[in-house]
Image (spheres, rainbow, N blue to C red):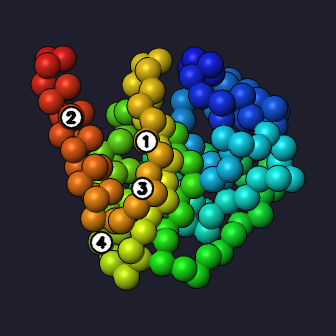
Amino acid sequence: MNSDIWVGFKHLNDLGISPDQLGDYDVLCLPENIEKEGESEKLFEAEETVHLYKILKSRGIKAYCLHDFGCEVPIYERRGETIYFGVLVIQYIVYPIVAGIIANWITEKLYHKNVRVVLHIIKNDKEEHIDYDGDGETLLKLLESLKEKRNAGNEQDN
């Protein structure tokens, strides 16, 4: 893994989590302020991040959060209309599964008008970064277009 891709990997390293420890992850479910903070006492996770992490694990996806590495991070529960998924680092191969889970979540929670998520989709040593803060319907369209782009790319690889 090329740990120079993104500042969040540097902050993970500052927390004592090396690229070797991350190993063969499929998804990293990280605190929403991991891009700004490298000290564990300043980090916080959204309740939705923890819930998503549990869903991914239950589906057999190799998902990790800071708790898996011994870092205790407080969980923020919000009661507004925005869904906060935190920062997700996703291996390209499992992107369609994760996108489907997020899409189902948004569809089931239609009363949530806004969604806040940062996605880092990694394929080989390249990264696609999406920092999204907007309505759920537009995010669903964005996730679908990325899935279509991925499928088109796979057809060209064959």
What is the CA distance from the residue labelled 3 to the residue labelled 2? 24 Å
Which mark is in front, 3 or 2? 2
- Label 4 sits on residue: 107
* In the image, residue 154 above or below residue 112: above
- Looking at the image, which is closer to me, 145 or 16? 145
What mark, if any, has residue 130 been given in the picture?
1
What is the CA distance from the residue labelled 3 to the residue labelled 1? 24 Å
Going from the N terminus, do you reach mark 2 or mark 1 first?
1
Q: Residues within 10 Å of mark 1 (few under 14, many from 20)?
A: some
Left/right placement of residue 119 relative to residue 104 reads right
What is the CA distance from the residue labelled 3 to the residue labelled 4? 19 Å
Q: Regarding mark 3 in the picture, which secondary structure is present there?
A: loop
Which mark is in front, 4 or 1? 1
- Label 2 sits on residue: 149
The image position of residue 134, as x and y in percent, is 40, 61
What is the CA distance from the residue labelled 2 to the residue labelled 1? 14 Å
Going from the N terminus, do you reach mark 3 or mark 4 first?
3
Which residue lies at the image location 71% right of the left edge and 66% below the top edge? 75
Q: Amino acid at mark 1?
A: Ile
Q: Amino acid at mark 4?
A: Thr
Which mark is in front, 2 or 1? 1
Q: Regarding mark 2 in the picture, which secondary structure is present there?
A: helix
Going from the N terminus, do you reach mark 4 or mark 2 first?
4
- Looking at the image, which is closer to me, 154 or 126? 126
What is the CA distance from the residue labelled 4 to the residue labelled 2? 22 Å
For the C terminus, the quadrant is top left
Left/right placement of residue 27 relative to residue 137 reads right
